[in-house]
Amino acid sequence: MIPVLGLEEGGAFPYLRAVASPLVCSEIASLAATLHKEATLWALPSLAQTQTPRRTSRQLDSVMARLQGPILCGALLGFVCLGGPGLAVEVKVPAEPLSTPAGKTAELTCSYSTSVGDNFALEWSFVQPGKPMSESHPILYFTNGHLYPTGSKAKRASLLQNPPTGGVATLKLTDVDPTDTGTYICQVNNPPDFYTNGVGLINLTVLVPPSSPLCSKSGQTSVGGSAALKCSSSQGAPRPVYNWVRLGSSSTPSPGGMVQDEVSGQLILTNLSLTNSGTYRCVATNQMGSASCELTLSVTGRMPLHLGFLSKHP
C-alpha cells in the first residue's frame, strides 16, 4: 500500500471521487516528487495491474523525467488536469436577483456546458438569507437518470427540463411564500472533471404586501412637551416605507415641530400645542400594496405660571 496517495499497488483509478482544489495538479506533482519513485510508478494506470518489476535507479530517473507537469498529474489521478475533452463544466445563471410575488410560481434558470456522461449529476439546494453556504439544504437531485426531490420544498419543486441533460436545468418552485426568500445553488458534477467550478448562485426574493401595521405613541403629550408616534408592519417584502398624515383638520404643525423617518416609521412631534391634537394615520407601502393604522393624539393644556403662583399665595 501507498497510504499517502491511497492507491493500491498496480491499481488503476480513472478518477478520484473528491473535489480537487485549483492547485490539485501542482499539489500532486509536488507530492509525487517526495515519494519513493517506485511507489509513484505503482500509481500509474498505464502499467499493468500486477506488481511492477523493480527498476534500477537510472531507469526510474529516466521514466520520471518524461512524466513532468500535467502529464504526471494526469497519470497520478487517471485523467488530465483539466478533465477529458468536453468534460469541463461551466454553469451560467442570471446575474440579477429574481423576485416573485407570494403564491405565484418562481422559475430559476440554470444552464451549463459539458459533455454529459454516465457520471453526470445535478443538484439544486437552498440557503436562507445571512447563512453560510455550508448550511444549505437540498431541494432536488438528478443522478443515474432519475430525479429525486427532497427536503421541505420537495412537493413544490420540479425541473422544467426532465431529464436535465440538454444543457438547461430550470428549477420550478410553485406557491412560493416568504420562507422561500434566499439563495438557490445550482451545482453540476460530471466526473472525471473535478477541476472546474460547476456552481451557480441565484438570489430570490418573494414579494409580500405589508401586513397591517401597529401604531403606538410615547412621550409627554402636554403643551410644550414632545411625543413619538411609532408604526411598524411585521411582514412586507421589499421592506415597507412609512408615511404619517394628520386627518380631519386644515391646521398642521409647523415644519420644525414634526420630523418623520420613513424607514423606521417614527414621527417625532416637538413643542406640542393644542393644535397638535387629532387623529394620525400611518400608511405602510411597498410595490405589492399598502396597509394602515390610526391613533388619536390628545394634547393637554397646563396652568399658566402666574395663575399657579396666585393660587398658592392669596
Image: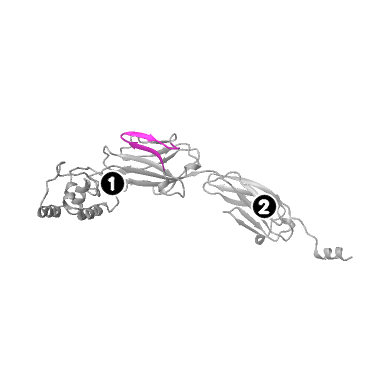
| x and y percentages locating residue 121 in the rendered image | 32, 39
Q: Which residues are magenta?
A: 137-153
Answer with the quarter of the image where residue 69 lies.
bottom left
The residue that mark 1 highlights is 194
The magenta stretch spans residue 166: no
- 301 or 154: nearer the viewer: 154
Q: Residue at x 11, y 54 (%)?
A: 57
Location of residue 156 in the rendering, given as x and y in whole percent from the top left corner: 44, 35
Residue nearer the viewer, 45 or 159: 45
Hey, what amino acid is under mark 1?
Answer: Phe
Query: What element does badge 2 sit on?
Result: strand
- The residue tagged 2 is 217
Residue 183 place in picture, x, y as percent: 43, 46
When the figure is inspected, residue 16 is found, relative to residue 144, above or below; the finding is below
Which residue is at a point 12% across and 55% down the rendered structure image? 61
How many numbered callouts? 2
SS for tag 1? Answer: loop
